[in-house]
Amino acid sequence: MDNGFTLGSLFDGIGGFPYAASFFGIKALWASEIMPECISITKRHFPDMEHVGDITKIHGGELKPVDIITFGSPCQDLSQAAGGKRLGLAGERSGLFREAVRIIREMKGETDGKYPKFAVWENVPGALSSSGRRDFKAVLEAFTETEIPMPCSGRWADAGMVRSGGTDLAWCVYDARLFGTAQRRRRVFLVASFGKPCAGEILFIPKSLHGYFEEGGTTGERAAICPENSVRETGRKAYVIGSYKSNSMMSDNPHSGFYETDTSRTLDRNGGNPCCHQGGLAIVESRECYQKEVGALCASDSKAPNSQYVQQNKLIVEETAVRRLTPKECERLQGYPDGWTETGVDGKPISDTKRYQMLGNSVAVPCVAYIMQGICNAEQDGSVYEDRSD
């Protein structure tokens, strides 16, 4: 399926944005990434996607114009897990955010404002509070090119909107566990729509992720921004992190050899932190498979030692063992197919250490898919573009 929409991915990583976009016929034309293993993985999955190199060395006006530019700029200087430094946008890594904004402006200048139509930014919730909450003010001002006042409360809410000139902007903190993954992973997503007032519709209008979940089963009963039931009722990948294999278990789930466990903590980039200790929650008699969650997959070391392991039920009650999540399970927690990070384009295996790192740094695919579906809906439904400024 190709609906004609195109995408460019900055700080591409392992291709989470292009992958989520592909569910809805959005084609990734190019990507910027510097980590060789990431590039090799995305070359395998997206052979037609051009790699344009280091973001600091490219010019937006020289790139192929695209409808959507996505980026999850490095968050190490914004995250509370970054050793407590919290340097914000003044930090070298998180400051790369400004390079992405530069590229957007350069492309708009070269195309007389026609492209990109949308920008999507993802980061840790710490972006709302770092540097005395001035960082997020700078983010809003960078997208809108307008001075934005601080809220009266002095704090940025978890969701909000800004309209200025030709830019319609909305942000919202999404938790991956409410989008079909067994992982508590809170991230702030920002959508900027240039010229069309539809950012709020994209982030806030309830909808079901038909393009993502429907293949494996029914979607959740509620078509809402937080489809709690979708995890249990579907047979797709992200939510099976299970720990006990049983021949007696019957399920439509393609990974039905596993009992699903509690919700994982955030996955760690070094593999030392992929989940917390759990207990199996399967009910064999009713032939149902229940899961809770693990904490979010982290991009840096965690100080919580219990977040390294998953408790494996061998005999349901009589005996337990503790083990680490595997890279395959981390792929599922982030919403990728099994083996997404296993090999590069050359077929050579990638080390587990690198796989943990890349997955911990990546986006939760279902959250991005929800936004991509919203963009497609907005593009196809002219009613959301009516001028409501008065």
Image (tube, helix red, strand yellow):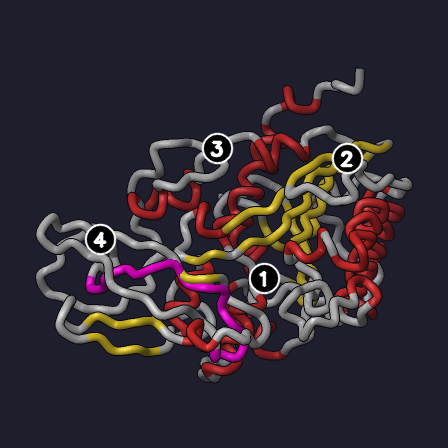
For the question of whether residue 141 can be seen, the reply is: yes
What residue is shown at x 68% (from left), y 30% (from top)?
A: 198
Nearer mark to the viewer, of 3 and 4: 4
- Asked if the residues shown at circle 1 and circle 3 are in contact, with their CB atoms under 8 angstroms apart, the answer is no
Where residue 179 sits: x, y (%)? Answer: 45, 46
Magenta span: 257-272
For the residues marked 4 and 1, what is the alpha-carbon distance in whole angstroms? 39 Å
**Residue at image mark 2:** 162
Viewer-nearest residue: 212 or 160: 160
Q: Residue 303, how many percent across, how many down?
A: 54, 76
Q: Of callouts 2 and 1, which one flags the residue occurring earlier in the amino acid sequence?
A: 1
Whole-Å distance between the Cαs marked 1 and 3?
31 Å
Whether residue 22 is visible to the viewer of this picture, yes or no, is no
The residue that label 3 is drawn on is 207
Q: Is tag 1's residue or tag 3's residue first in the polypeptide sequence?
A: 1
Secondary structure, mark 3, is: loop
Whether residue 9 is situated above or below residue 178 in the rendered picture: below
- CB atoms of marks 4 and 1 within 8 Å: no
Q: How many marks?
A: 4
Nearer to us of marks 3 and 2 is 2
- Which amino acid is tagged 1? Asp
Instruction: Read off the residue under disc 1.
Output: 48
- Disc 3 marks a residue whose amino acid type is Lys
**Secondary structure at numbered mark 2:** strand
Which of the pair 370/62 is nearer the observer? 370
